[in-house]
Image: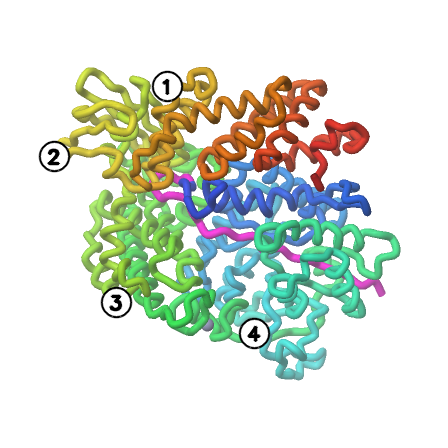
Amino acid sequence: MPQHLCIHGHFYQPPRFDPWLEEVLPEASAAPYPDWNQRINRESYDPLGAARILDHHGRISEIINCYEFINFNFGPTILRWMARHSPTTYHKILEGDRKSIERFGRGNAMAQIYHHIIMPLTTDEDRDVEIQWSIQDFQQRFGRRPEGFWLSETAVSTPDLEALARANVRFTVLAPRQARAISDSRGNWTDVSEDTLPKDQPYLIKLPSGLEISVFFYDGPISQAVAFENLLSDGEGFWQRIVANHDQQLLSLATDGESYGHHFKFGEMALAWVLKRALQEDSPLSLTNFSSYLDQYPPKQEVMIHEKSSWSCVHGIKRWQDDCGCSTGDHPGWNQLWRRPLRRSLNVIRYYVDEHYRHYAKELFRDPRQAMLDYGNCLCEGIGRDDFLRKHQARDLDQNQRAAALKFLEMQRMSLASFASCAWFFDDLGRIEPLNALSYGSRALEMLKDLQGPDVEPLVLEVLEEARSNDPALGDGPKIWKEQVLPRRVRPAHMAVMGACMQDRESFFSFPGLEFSTRKEKNLLEVDYKWTCLQEQGREKFALEQEGALDCRVQTEEGQSLGIGNLDKKLQDQILLQLDREHEEKVLSDLKQAASILGRHREVFFETGQQEPFAGRGILSLGMIMHYLASSEEPDDWSAFWKDVLQNNPYLVFLLKSMLEKELERLCSENLQLWDKAGEMIQKSRKLGIYPDIYHLQNRIWGMGLNLFKNHTLKMFDFKD
Ligand SMILES: [Zn+2]
């Protein structure tokens, strides 16, 4: 009998998108990357699509798209981001699923609960919405219906399984300790534990409604070892650990996708090695995925689960509403008493949002419930907003009514997004995840008010009074709401400040959720804006009080003076990025002009507020170093000098590295002759302690069948340096 191996990767990132701009904004903690999505994408998702297998000399001998051989789930929010920001990785994932269908008969990709909410803690209505939106998103991306669903944190109760079965989902995957009892073929039940449960087969759950769903239980110890026992440090060791268990009919592992490359540097190479070994002819195990295995070996036994259990809280699902003791363990002595009031406050918002929708959306939609269930098609751009409204409108709607109809749905979406599980997962209310949850809630409240709903904010704040951060400086819920959540709201006046900061008279800003243009005319600044998801437009004028990149100020209608310092940090960073872009081209050609802009940029970047003589000289150094790297005539002993200059200037290193990467990319895409030059630049930059990211260039060279090691230049691209 063939023995099977199924490795599952659960890929998940908390929703980081800003609820107004619909974009992930800069996060300083993710440096040297602009935000955590970028960082984890580069460290994990990206290399998994092109994972290297090295030969004995440390040279690339093979590059594997792991998504072709492992079972996996990615959530809609991260895929939407990836399609925009890392299309190559995104297409590797889609291609992986396509090829797995050719190989295994069924696809590797599973769907995931839309906002990664804890399903046992929600209502029947919201369960269906979260599942339907996810199916619609999956269909749009993968071109097929999902057969399996990953439950957030594998948190499960019977109503969740009923909802999945109603949506024709065939199976889910749970942790072994979530099984309570199994039956034999004659219907006799035996209690099981995670140790006694045979995990090498799928089980059937017969639901009270008469529907059925299958469940796989993964192998706990090896999955745990991937996360906590350094198994990914050595591909062959990982493989031997798996083979030691090959007497099982099915060995399935469930791992966090970020283990590969993010938690463990080069972990994707260990995985690629295991996949290569499993694909060899003499392998004792053959690779499979859950769907295809289910086809070949349908369940013979039934299972009963522990109601309201999960894979990451030994107390069931308390981690997402109580101070149960489960946390990351980074701060012994901290409590999580804030979890319950945080959930209650978001439940208050959810209740009023939903009530308002129930009562008033019927004036706009023929069937508000159906419109809501269908809205996922809009979110994944399977259908345009105009067509969507034509399909669901109660009658011919005018422009304002159409905007209101979309706002009703967006209000629902923001309220649902606030329940993403990560808000409760960690150890403090002051972290970014609860802040994001409250921001989504705040956005929902804002729209509720716009739609003539009740003002629920005082009630929400009352509940939040019970939530306290462990950091006394951050204080309680209302303080966090006032100081950190409310400033995130984006108003036309904030757009005006952004436009005023730009050098040009006219500027255009484009985010997925908001587009606006600004025009300066004498002492006035005009803003034209459009909230794209709402198809809502407007135009406002502001008095321009003061000019000059980062010193500019505008005056609001109420006579309030606003400058960059009055904006939320995210908008400040956004202005700096935009200024950077405005000046990218000019940096080398006009160093003097760029000096003032980038000098200030650096100041704000570090939030030091200090005036440093560096500002002007730094940018000049940057130009001179780039010139040094590009020139073949400079005497070599300059390297010590420039290394010294760079030593205490991390921001300069950051700028130099990104400029260098762009230059290398340019050289290598033009013609082969220029690769010599690129190779020299890499060598020279390494002497300065600068290590440009050349992963993709290396892969490309390898893919062209070039021998990396034959000549001196290509050796510069050598992985091992
Ligand atoms: Zn717990």
How much space separates mark 4 and mark 3, taking CA atoms?
34 Å
- Indicate which disc, 4 or 1, sits on the residue closer to the N terminus: 4
Q: Which element carries disc 4, helix, strand or loop?
A: strand
Name the side, left or right, on which 485 lies relative to 283.
Answer: left
The amino acid at mark 2 is Glu
Asked if the stretch drawn in magenta spans residue 5, the answer is: yes
- Indicate which disc, 4 or 3, sits on the residue closer to the N terminus: 4
- Indicate which disc, 3 or 2, sits on the residue closer to the N terminus: 3
- Residue to which mark 1 is pinned: 593
Residue 199 drawn at (x, y percent)? 69, 71
Asked if the stretch drawn in magenta spans residue 507, the answer is: no
How much space separates mark 3 and mark 2, taking CA atoms?
34 Å
Image: 525 above or below 370: above
- Residue to which mark 4 is pinned: 305
- Indicate which disc, 1 or 3, sits on the residue closer to the N terminus: 3
- Residue to which mark 3 is pinned: 466
Dot 3 crowding, Cα within 10 Å, few <14, some 14–19, many 20+: some
Residue 22 drawn at (x, y percent)? 39, 40
Name the side, left or right, on which 133 lies relative to 263.
Answer: left
> Quadrant of residue 49 in the image?
top right
Image: 541 above or below 456: above
